[in-house]
Image (spheres, coloured by chain):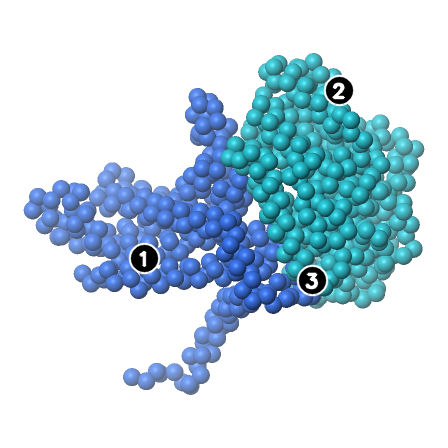
Chain colours: A cyan, B blue
Amino acid sequence: MKLNSLPVAATFLLASLGPTAAAEFQFWYGNTGAAETAIQNACAAFNDSQTEHKITCVGQGSYDTAMQKAIAAVRAKQHPVLIQFFDAGTLDLMLSGAVEPVAQALPDVDWSNYVTGAKSYYETSKGQLYSQPYNASTVVFYGNKEVMAKGGIDAPPQTYEALVEALRKLKTAGVECPYVTDGHPWRVLEQVAARHGAPIASRSNGYDGLDAEYQINQGLPAQHLTNLAAWHDEGLVKLDPETRAGTFSDAFNAGECAFMEASTANYSAAYKALGDKVLVGMAPVYEGTERKNTFVGGGSLWIMKGHDPEAVAAAGEFLNFVRQPEQQINLIREAAFVPVTNDVMTVMRDQNLLTDPAFGSIEAGMESLNQPGNENSRGIRLGFYVQFRDIFKEETQRAFSGEQTMQAALDNAKTRGDELLRRFQQTYSGVELP
Amino acid sequence: MPPSFAGRWTPFWLSLPMLLIVALFFYIPVYLSFWWSFTLERPFGGGSEFVGFQNYARVLSDPIFWDAAWRTLVFMVFGSTLAIIVPLILALAADRMVPLSHTARNVLIWPKGIAGASIGVVFAFIFNPFVGIMAPLNGLFPGLWNPGSDGTDAFIMLLIAHVWNGIPFNFVILLAGLQAVPRSLTQAAAIDGASPWRRIRDVQLPMIAPQLFLTFVLEFTESVVSAFALIDTMTQGGPGGATRLLVYKIYQDGFKGYDLSGAATQSAILMVFVLCLAAFQFLYLEKKVRYER
């Protein structure tokens, strides 16, 4: 295969050949930037580590694009054996009939070694794991020591009550952007609800059946989002377009803002920009809350049906390879993801890596993932969920800009979201949720 | 006179490649789109349920669809009108040989070479509330302009980018029309004492009616779909759905939301709408255009 020196040509050729040959197989992923480099390094390391199999890793540009191309490829029966999908697509894939559960394809693996908050997102209510958690992250709390000092604050607050007090102090001290968020539901809804153990939908966030209904307009999620809107009106919370940098993470990294709730993976860019001014802790909860675990976001690896056993076995080899602690540590080092298996934390502790500032977000992230859980902190299993995220953003944007109250926004989002769920249920009528 | 092809089938064979391409990229997708609009289609395939007109009932009773349709209409009317009036003024000026009109004729064509997506990226920067041209105004009146959080601002930004994008083509067409108006007519009008305005209104505009009609037809049908690249790069339909035109909603529903049936239904509705629009323009408006001089 001389064409391998031309990755693009190789991609086209392999794609046109359909299912890949036994020893050679393709893997599609959606990441860009540091994460893409880390994934390509893992692929190269796998190819160097043995001679039997050869993996070709193809970047698709974004999670969304990767999903779109996978849908098209599956419909045309041209899909690769291994694909990375993002968290929000989990239910669509589980019901697609196009995937083989990893627990079934690789029965010899000790799946109980996986971190609970990572595993629960991708397993059925009966405990069968569908995909292998790979590049995982969770929400943690970031503070900029230098900006915080302007308001006389030395540690990131643990509760929202303390946070608001701190934000008011910062505002009085002339800090224009005390706290910044983009209002993405992963950060302001899903993870907040999870760590308070509150549901965003009935039937345990959809794990127990396709007849779930949204519950975001009541209880803790509604309370928190109403607070967020009030803090925004007060000038304590800034949104993406209100920052000079344009996005919340850029604004934080540029030193505009004192605090943000963001993915552990944001750490690598934040540390590069701000050095040891970055403080990381678990994201706040409201006073009197018994803290529950946050769950993962990011990507997991799915084995696709329609390939011969040799290709599936080769893909299994790759899954085993990236599960090894040293491979996970490489991924964590290069792109600030969190460990997905428990043994990695032991190895990192033994090697004294956790004190290394390059791994600054790992401890807070792991602590957050390893909190005790309940039925609402397992994950989200709701149909057309990607579309719901857009609806949520749209309605809450209207609330933040003052066109409607936050309660009205959440009521609307619930109504529109429930309509999606009913249509999803009808689209998959006769299919049982595994 | 009978056709002078060697065989009966020669014309067919000659046009076959083009027919195949049109079938592959237009008729088959259109057919599938109509078919999917009557089913509930699973994203990964493997099952689709025939539901009759349920998708149409759902889409037509969805206030979000009508909201997007209304925004599409507003965009079409304002965007197209401005995208014809602005080049028309420029063309009239260039035709009157105002100073620098030769240079202007050249420079005004250049934007044609820029893809919609690139225009979107550039305009998003130009209209950035902190570093763009509105930044000084924002300094005087904080919060006056922010297309990232104010829907009206975002819509205006989209309109400006669209109009700018439409200038070169319409300018060329209209200028060519104006140049073809016999000088003797305007000269005769001038001798009769008609002012420049009067000459534009009573001589030049009626004479370029065919060109105006052409730009009008193309602009109205194009504005429905061509805004996609601008929306995708500048606003992604936001904030709060303020710039979500139908064409972008279809993309969002189908590609980001995996609602293939809903997206297909809306495509079908949009297609019928554009066809009706074009039919109205040709069957009704064209009768009012005189091509002979």
Residue picked out by circle 3: A429
One can see residue A136 in this view: no
Q: Is residue B116 left or right of residue A47?
A: left
Quadrant in the picture for the C terminus of chain B: bottom left
Which of label 1 and label 2 is nearer to you?
Answer: 2
Residue closer to the observer: B250 or A201: A201
Amino acid of disc 2: Ala
Residue picked out by circle 1: B214
Q: CA distance from mark 1 to mark 2?
A: 66 Å
One can see residue A398 in this view: yes
Please give the label number shown on residue A155.
2
Q: CA distance from mark 3 to mark 2?
A: 52 Å
Chain containing mark 1 = B
**B188 versus A220 height, above or below:** below
Task: Report x, y in % for residue B64.
Answer: 52, 49
Q: What element does badge 3 sit on?
A: loop
- Residue furthest front as drawn: A218
Residue closer to the observer: A55 or A110: A110
Q: Is residue A101 left or right of residue A171?
A: right
